[in-house]
């Protein structure tokens, strides 16, 4: 890995980074964990995006996942373990998410800084989504400039059923208020083919054709000079700012923190199941009332 201005002093362990024909490809590389997000992978993604943005041999960036999934969400086993570092007085040495409202806000905002680098950098970022793009995976994908999905890929935020609200919220800017509410009220997911119909994705392709389609699009984008691409991206993103996108990210983090402190029966059961039976049972019990969990978009 090329260092980012001398600050990247290690080989990344949880992402892959390569440059070819003016396109940088950043790949989540925890396939055994379905590319579930943890702090290390988010930090490595953040640094790789800055590296690609700085390099003169890169005009466009593709973000994708190794193995069967783009990203199945946050690593819940790690998240529910807590940081656990204690002082001599028995208090937590650092802020512990989920313990106090302000501490949880702090935690969400620190996590956001990794995701929000995607719209902040100058170069276009294309999300290539296959398999699962769930929960935290949607935080990443919907922050990208373009989202291209496999027809049979799955996108949604099942965690809204019991765990919280998206801490990075671009849903309304992609699909409007009613569809944003429909997806978040139920935590249902939809296929890539249906995501295109409501604006969550730009295009969907048969899974076998996804790589070629994204490669062709990325090369077309990369054929434009960096300065022009930056101008195009930044004016559109400034328009999003005028629509409140920046403020909404801050409020989304606070809403997620508030939801984490909720004491309703579904959240209480999830936490109890995690403690007594583990993640698999907790997810099964959380999702059981929702059947297959798909929303199917009728018509075109």
Image (cartoon, grey):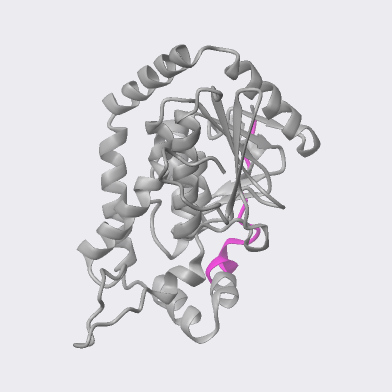
Residue 42 at x, y percent in the picture: 46, 52
- Front in this rendered view, residue 110 or 6: 6
Q: Residue furthest right?
A: 208
- Front in this rendered view, residue 85 or 175: 85
Residue at 49%, 78% (x, y): give it.
274
Q: Is 125 above or below relative to 107?
A: above
Residue 126 at x, y percent in the picture: 56, 31
Q: Is 298 above or below relative to 257?
A: above
| Lateral position of residue 134 relative to residue 179, left or right | right
Residue at 44%, 82% (x, y): give it.
272
Residue at 44%, 65% (x, y): give it.
162
Disc tally is 0
| Lateral position of residue 153 relative to residue 163, left or right | right
Residue 39 at x, y percent in the picture: 44, 59
Residue at 59%, 71% (x, y): give it.
284
Quadrant assignment, res 236: top left
- Front in this rendered view, residue 238 or 300: 238
- Front in this rendered view, residue 33 or 223: 223
Q: Is 252 above or below relative to 201?
A: below
Magenta highlight on residue 294:
yes
Q: Which residues are magenta?
A: 286-299
Q: Could one spot residue 161 in this view of the protein?
A: yes
Q: Which of the image's four quarters has the N terminus? A: top right
Residue 103 at x, y percent in the picture: 24, 64
Q: Which of the image's four quarters has the C terminus? A: top right
> What secondary structure is the magenta-colored segment mainly?
loop
Magenta highlight on residue 235:
no
Q: Could one spot residue 143 in this view of the protein?
A: no
């Amino acid at each position: 890995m090329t260092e980012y201005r001398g600050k990247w002093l290690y080989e990344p362990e949880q992402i892959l980074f390569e440059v070819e024909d003016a396109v940088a490809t950043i790949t989540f590389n925890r396939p055994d964990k379905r590319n579930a997000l943890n702090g290390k992978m988010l930090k490595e993604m953040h640094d790789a995006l800055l590296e690609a943005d700085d390099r003169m041999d890169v005009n466009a960036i593709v973000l994708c996942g190794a193995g069967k999934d783009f990203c199945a969400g946050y690593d819940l086993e790690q998240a529910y373990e807590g940081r656990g570092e204690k002082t001599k007085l028995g208090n937590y040495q650092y802020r512990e998410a989920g313990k106090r409202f302000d501490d949880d806000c702090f935690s969400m905002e620190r996590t956001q800084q990794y995701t929000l680098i995607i719209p902040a950098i100058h170069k276009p970022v294309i999300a290539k989504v296959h398999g699962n793009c769930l929960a935290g995976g949607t935080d990443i994908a919907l922050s990208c400039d373009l989202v291209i999905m496999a027809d049979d890929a799955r996108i949604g935020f099942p965690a809204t059923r019991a765990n919280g609200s998206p801490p990075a919220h671009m849903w309304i800017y992609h699909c409007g208020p009613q569809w944003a509410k429909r997806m978040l009220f139920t935590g249902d997911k939809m296929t890539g083919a249906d995501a295109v119909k409501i604006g969550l994705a730009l295009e969907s392709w048969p899974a076998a054709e996804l790589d070629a389609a994204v490669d062709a699009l990325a090369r077309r984008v990369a054929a434009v000079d960096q300065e022009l691409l930056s101008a195009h991206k930044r004016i559109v993103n400034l328009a999003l700012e005028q629509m409140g996108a920046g403020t909404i990210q801050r409020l989304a983090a606070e809403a997620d923190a508030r939801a984490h402190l909720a004491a309703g029966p579904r959240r209480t059961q999830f936490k109890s199941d995690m403690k007594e039976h583990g993640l698999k049972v907790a997810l099964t019990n959380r999702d059981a009332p929702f059947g297959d969990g798909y929303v199917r978009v009728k018509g075109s």
